[in-house]
Amino acid sequence: MLWISKPEKASMIRKYFPALAGLLVTLALLGGCGAPPEPASSHILTYTYDNDTRKLIQILEKQLQLSEYQDFNRRYKGLIIPQSLLLRFEPFVLALSTESKIPAVLLLDAPWVQRYGVAGWLYELETARFFSPKALAPPIAEAFSVTLPQATGAADKRLVAVPPYIKGNILFYRKDLLKKHGVTAPRTWDELRAVCRKIMSREPGLKYGLILHMTNFVNDFYPILWGYGGEVVDAEGRPAFGEPQNWEACKAALEDLKSMQPDIIPGPEQLKLFTKNESLRQSFFQGEALFMINWNTRTYNFRQLIKQCLASPNGCLTDFNQIGVAPIPCKQGHPYRYSNIGSFGWGVNRFSVGPDRLWVINRAREFIQLVTHKRFQVLNAEMYDHVPSLRDALEEVKKQNLNPVVMQVYDQAFAEEDMRLRSRPYSRRVNNVLEKHLVRVLFREIQPEEALLAALKELQSPGPI
Amino acid sequence: MPGEFTPPRHSLRSRLLLLSGATFLLCAGVIILFFPLLNVTLQNLLERSVTKMRETKETEALTIARLLVLEFSQMRELMEARPGEEDKVDQRIMNLIWQKVTFNEVIEGIELIQDRSDLLGRRLTYLFYRREAPDLEPMSGPQKLLKQFHGAERKLLEAINSPETIDKEKLEVAVNLGPKDEGQMLLRYLPVHVLVPEEGAIFWGVAKIGIDLSGLTALQALQDEEQEYLRTAIWLEIILSLFISGILAVSLLYLWARSLTEPLRTLSATARDFKSLKSTEYDLWLDNLRRVDPRGQIEVTELKETLLRLGKGIHRLGERLFATEYQACLSRILARGLDVLSDGGTAASGEKAEGRTRAEFPPELQTELADWQHFVSDPEGEWQTFDLTPILQRAWRLVKLGLPAQAAARLDLDPLPQVWGSPGYLAQAVLLLLDYAAGVLPPEGELTCRAGPRAAGGLQVMIAVWGRKFSPQECDALLQPPKGEGQFAENLGPALAAAIMHWHKGELSARPEEPQGLGFTLTLPPPPTGHEDSSSPD
């Protein structure tokens, strides 16, 4: 035991008393003059409500009982957007352009992501450690990144939204027939023509070589045009198809499509049949078409149709193995094939984050991690044939062979080396004007050049109401 | 010089008061230190509240502006707006602006600025400001005009809805601050998108919305006044509280320190008296020491008890010293007498001095012993009036017997008056003086003793030694007991004799005698009247 004599004790007290007193005074000063604590609040994050997401969340929360998804509704407030507003207008522009803090997290179509990201309305996700683009499959990460000016002055592509799955239009084909006739999926339009000519003459059941949408035609036309090296708008979203190179590419693409009528692409009369809902998939399912351009998510519809058809076969497809997928062809000599991306991505409203609302960053990070989580994506792949956007989720689906169709679409379409995912122009006006004029070419109402001129003229004039 | 003793210059009480005062000043300093901190805290608090108010106002302005822009987004007439003469479309737009500005107190004015500009850089603008400032004329009504914008405002308008890499926030701050042509207001610039079915939100231009700031300005001025008032009030309160606490502290500390140090101070003062204490005041000093009240302070009690014990010890030591010195004196006298009376030199010297024979020695020896025994007896006894002559004679006989053979001795006794005192102690005083004188007498010197009455009353005895030189300092030192460390006296007889004389209200003085000698003068006062009793003084 250590004994301290009285003089030593007194000496120690004399030695340490001033320091102790100073420390106490300092602590008192520091303790008394600090900033007042922030008042506690409920901190409920708002997000744009999405039915498909909610269904999956409910399964993860209720059926699979995953702890991280418990009390989802209490932590995050879903804002339901009226369909009349969402489909006809673009309500998020009004919210973001007027610096509204609500909603904090938005589910955005890929073209919107480009527009809002460039305008500086979305929070950059990588720097704030929301999400690393490296976790995403390569083609999709690029599509949800925008070029943002950096502090160094150099422009750099940054991730501003995270898609929970990959959706894009691709080329569906009759794998059984191509295999039967010893040909492979075409890479170019010339090859597609050749395949059509070879097989259609030998397969009387086939009515069309290639079918594509007649409503929202531009969605199918854009990847075709990109495969011809053409652009509709410039980097800032202004119409650019009047420029010579683009003009020629547009004209060539339209001419080629027109030249495939009526032998390969349906003629004007038959095309009218494809203006109805679900007509395209029904035609392909009935075995009428050799090729079809459609969203990759149609695999789910085909599987459902095949199930129904097995109960009462009526000349339709009976096995999904009869269907093959590939990227939409490009022009001979062009290095890339393209898909018009249809994925939605979760982005964070930049105005919802502020010095007094730092909690939004944490909550938004949590939210995005939940709705893009590997478990979420794997379940989505299993149930709805949605191709996961996460590398981990893709590997999980592949490793456990949870859904071969999903991996078939990814491996044979999106993961092709020359495949590029791009989003359509974000201007609805550009899309609508092009849709209105270009589709008339296929209906033989107008020549390609005339259609392009009419579209250009309309876009350059002030918008009539 | 190291090791040199430096006497303390400050008392415990003054040190305590000084330390207390210093402690109080330190505490006051710490308390005063809080004032700047409090000031800073107050400043921050008020600044935060002003900032919060401003932010709230800005948020409110943004909300109002947003609501207006959302309303403008439904106004599809905007898409038909063209420069030129006013038409129905313009009227509808301007009427809406007028209603919003006129019927909303918070909105100072609105400008709707079309994105497109003409070759001169002018933009189609619809505007209306209420202009409530007294120095501004009210606007006649909403206006449609082609307006040119400059500087930061033009840059801001060009930047809105374009991916240009400019700092929009800086531009907003630049155009939002400071007075405007239209009056003092907070401006908000928000893009106007018109909702067009199937086409979405089409960018049309910019809404510039002015929000009234007068309420905030007034509130800020009030805050500034309140801040100044609070600061002054707190400062005064701190100073006043320090002043009052200072007075209280000084008063209380003084009283406490005084009360606390009083016993030690009294003890110290009593102990200090010891330095200048006379032998007659010794008992008084001990009485004073006993009267010191420790007031329960253990340190003072212990010091007091120690001093008392020392005091009593010194008293006993003095008595012992006196007795020892006197016994030594008797021994020396006896030794000298016996030496003379023994064989050898004593006889020769006796024959030379007095011419006595050996046969005569026994009666002298008997006298010698009788005298010696008289002086050996206890000096204590009752004080009385008596004659000093027999004492002088006996003492002279004893001392003379042991003188050197060549030395001369003379006794002159006049009839002496009665004296008042202790016969024993006065006999000791006389014998001590004579013994000393015999001790310093050179072999061929001379010793004289004369006694007689004094003119003023009482008697005087003068004892002188001749044959040796004495300095005045030596004479003074003879009558003083040795004081201080290292001082030593071989014979304390004169000092003790002086003390006895002092005790008897008499006096003993020593002085050098010319040409070579030392003289003692012993004076005794006449007996006091009324002292018929024989009790000794206490």
Image: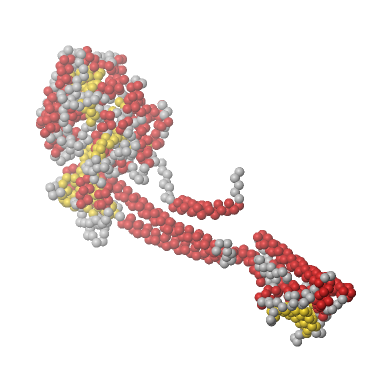
Query: Is residue B96 something that shows in the picture?
Result: no
Q: Position of residue A435 (x, y in %)?
A: 17, 31
Residue A251's image quarter?
top left
* Colour pattern: secondary structure
Q: Nearer the viewer, residue B249 or B535?
A: B535
Judging depth in this view, the residue of A8 and A413 nearest the camera is A8
Residue shown at 17% from the left, 22% from the top:
A188
Compared across the picture, whether B520 is left or right of B66 comes to right
* Front in this rendered view, residue B137 or A400: A400
Asked if residue A118 is positioned above or below residue B360 in the image, the reply reads above
Residue B185 screen position, x and y as percent:
27, 54
Res A423 → quadrant = top left
* Horizontal side, residue B17 vs residue B263: left or right: left
Whether A170 is drawn above or below B78: the answer is: above
Q: Residue at x 12, y 26 (%)?
A: A255
Query: Residue placed at 47% from the left, 52% from the top?
Result: A26
Q: Nearer the viewer, residue B501 or B179?
A: B501
Q: Quadrant of residue A210?
A: top left
Q: Quadrant of the C terminus of chain B?
A: bottom right
| Residue B189 position in % (x across, y down) | 25, 48
Residue A354 seen in the figure: yes
The quadrant of the image that shows the N terminus of chain B is bottom right
